[in-house]
Amino acid sequence: DETCSKCSRRARPTTSSSPSRRPSWSPGCGRALRRREAPEPFVVGELAIDFERRRVTVAGEAVDLTAKEFELLRVLSLHAGGAVTYETLLRRIWSKHANPDTNLVRIFVRNLRRKLGDSATNPAYLFNERGVGYSMPLPSRPSSAGGTP
């Protein structure tokens, strides 16, 4: 995860020469690491992604995804609200593929949209950022229990 790798680069060496001392982390890194341990489900409309169980549902119905499809959805959801470039997706998901190209990403997005019941012409979950890559909307906010009077 890029957040955790940034945190490890920001670790400040301790002043003690004791090998048992760990580097100190900035407060933001501790929060990022705690979030990574127990991520909350990502919910947009009827789409719910449970990262811990690697389970995806739409309107309460389980969606069967391949490992690559789930990883694509995971990467996009972790960067919700912003575009993820084709190059980033290829590097993060298909790094071991001999000659990955942007068409590979497009094919997987098309298949993922079909499985999620999403549309390329009127998307709810996976948005094409023309010439750049793809994005997802920010997760839904839970409604307040009391509502408004």
Image (tube, helix red, strand yellow):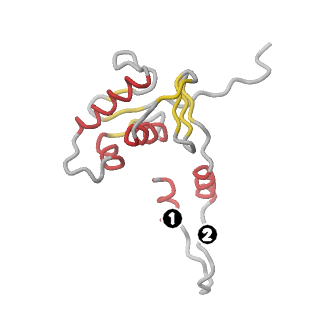
Q: Residue 8, labelled with which disc? A: 1
Left or right, 62 with respect to 104, comes to right
Estimate how packed mark 1 is, as few (under 14), some (14 to 19) or many (20 or more) residues with alpha carbons within 10 Å: some
Q: Relative to 79, say whether 92 is above or below.
A: below
Residue visible at 59% across and 84% down in the picture:
19
Residue 29 found in image quarter: bottom right
* Residue nearest the observer in this picture, 43 or 137: 43
* Residue nearest the observer in this picture, 107 or 4: 107
Residue 61 found in image quarter: top right
On the image, numbered disc 2 is attached to which residue? 24
Residue 41 percent across, percent down from the top left: 59, 37
* Residue nearest the observer in this picture, 112 or 14: 112
The residue tagged with tag 2: helix, strand or loop? loop
Residue visible at 34% across and 31% down in the picture:
109
Residue 90 found in image quarter: top left
Left or right, 34 with respect to 8, comes to right
Residue 37 percent across, percent down from the top left: 61, 52
Residue visible at 45% across and 53% down in the picture:
2
Q: Residue 120, labelled with which disc? A: none
Amino acid on which disc 1 is placed: Ser
Q: Which quarter of the image is occupied by the C terminus?
A: top right
The residue tagged with tag 1: helix, strand or loop? helix
Q: Earlier in the sequence, mark 2 or mark 1?
A: 1
Amino acid on which disc 2 is placed: Ser
Residue 121 percent across, percent down from the top left: 34, 16
Estimate how packed mark 2 is, as few (under 14), some (14 to 19) or many (20 or more) residues with alpha carbons within 10 Å: some
Pointers 2 and 1 in contact (CB under 8 A)? no
Q: Relative to 104, say whether 38 is above or below.
A: below
Residue 67 percent across, percent down from the top left: 40, 42
Residue reaching furthest to the bottom: 17
